[in-house]
C-alpha cells in the first residue's frame, strides 16, 4: 500500500514538474522497463536473502549438534 502511494505521488510530481503534455505510450514503455528491472532486482535480492537465511540456520543447527554431542560425552563420563 505504501509503495503504491509513493509511486502515485512520484507520478504526480513528474507530471507537474515536466512542462507540456507527456507522451503516454513512451511513459508506458519506459515505466514497464523500469518496473521489470526493479522486479528482477527485488526478486533476486529476496532469493539471495532466503538462501543466506537457510545457510545461516543450517550452520546454527550443525553447531548445536556438535555442542550436543560434546555435552553427551562430558556428561556420560561424569
Image: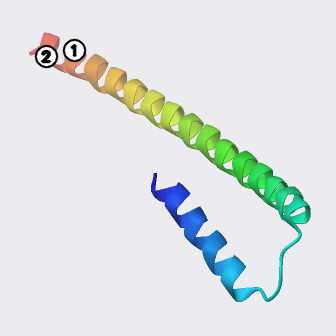
Side (left or right) of 34 relative to 45: right
Q: What is the total number of numbered labels drawn onto the structure image?
A: 2
57 is higher (above) or lower (below) than 10: above
Residue displayed at 79% across by 89% down: 19
Alpha-carbon span between mark 1 and mark 2: 5 Å
> Where residue 15 is drawn, which disc sits there?
none
Tell me where residue 15 appears, x and y as whole percent.
71, 78
Q: Are marks 1 and 2 in contact (CB under 8 Å)?
A: yes
* Residue 60 occupies quadrant: top left
Q: Is residue 43 above or below residue 10?
A: above
Which of 2/43 is in front? Answer: 2
Res. 33 image quadrant: bottom right
**Crowd around label 1: few <14 · some 14–19 · many ≥20 (10 Å):** few
Q: Is residue 69 left or right of residue 44?
A: left
Q: Is residue 13 above or below residue 44?
A: below
Near mark 2 (Cα within 10 A), the count class, few <14, some 14-19 or many ≥20, is: few
> On the rendered structure, is 40 left or right of 53?
right
Provide residue 61's location: percent of width, then percent of height. Answer: 38, 25
Residue at disc 2, secondary structure: helix
Where residue 52 sits: x, y (%)?
A: 55, 40
Label 1: which secondary element? helix
Residue position for label 1? 72
Residue holding disc 2:
75
Quarter in which the C terminus is drawn: top left
Amino acid at each position: 500500500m505504501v509503495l503504491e502511494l509513493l509511486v502515485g505521488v512520484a507520478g504526480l510530481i513528474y507530471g507537474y514538474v515536466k512542462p507540456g503534455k507527456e507522451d503516454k505510450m513512451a511513459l508506458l514503455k519506459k515505466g514497464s522497463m523500469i518496473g521489470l528491472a526493479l522486479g528482477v532486482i527485488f526478486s533476486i535480492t529476496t532469493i539471495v536473502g532466503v538462501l543466506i537465511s537457510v545457510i545461516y540456520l543450517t550452520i546454527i543447527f550443525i553447531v548445536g549438534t556438535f555442542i550436543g554431542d560434546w555435552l553427551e560425552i562430558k556428561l556420560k563420563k561424569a
